[in-house]
Amino acid sequence: MSNKRIILEMGTGNDLYGQDYTKAARRAVQDSLHHSSITLFAKLGIDHSEMQVDVTIAVQDPAQVDCDLVAQDLPRGRATVRAVKGGLNVTDPESDAVHIVATAAIEAWLPDQATAYRLSS
């Protein structure tokens, strides 16, 4: 059975003083999650464990993101997280402090439910 993407949410997060890419990534995921309220599972009787969740984190230094830790922040589904080049590093010209800005895209996939339901006449 093929999967269908049912959700795409985006968010941003930052770490202004600690230069912590994982903290910025986790904040981006939290921002994204706060844009959603998914009632689909309860309404259709679908177990949320059937949902595959793919998270893409964009930061300037992807190797600095602890993807396993970010995955722990996902409340539902089976999560995979990958970090890619993107986001922003903004340097304060007076202090040389680097402010990390991360972006997150969260995609949720479910098995195709097209044959499970039909319109009644």
Image: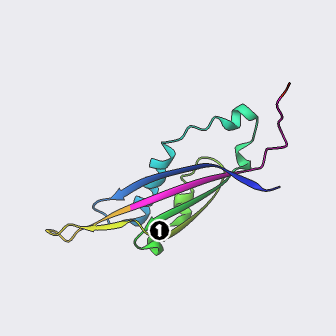
Amino acid tagged 1: Val
User: Where on the picture, by quarter, is residue 103?
Assistant: bottom left
Residue 89: x %, y % from top left: 32, 68
Say left or right for 97 vs 27: left
Magenta region includes residue 55:
no
Q: Residue at x 79, y 44 (%)?
A: 113
Q: Residue at x 74, y 42 (%)?
A: 47
Q: Is 56 or 6 nearer to us in this picture?
A: 6
Q: Secondary structure at mark 1?
A: loop
Characterize the local packing of mark 1: few (<14), some (14-19) or many (20 or more) Cα atoms within 10 angstroms. Answer: many
- Is residue 114 depicted above or below 4 in this figure? above
Report the residue that reaches farthest toward the front: 121
Q: Is 10 or 19 nearer to us in this picture?
A: 10
- Is residue 48 depicted above or below 12 in this figure? above
Determine which residue is flagged by label 1. 65
Magenta region includes residue 118:
yes
Instruction: Give the quadrant of the N terminus.
Output: bottom right
Q: Residue at x 45, y 52 (%)?
A: 11
Instruction: Give the quadrant of the C terminus.
Output: top right
Say left or right for 21 vs 121: left
Say left or right for 63 vs 78: left
Residue 106: x %, y % from top left: 56, 54
Question: Which span of residues is magenta-colored?
Answer: 102-119
Q: Residue at x 50, y 70 (%)?
A: 84
Residue 32: x %, y % from top left: 48, 49
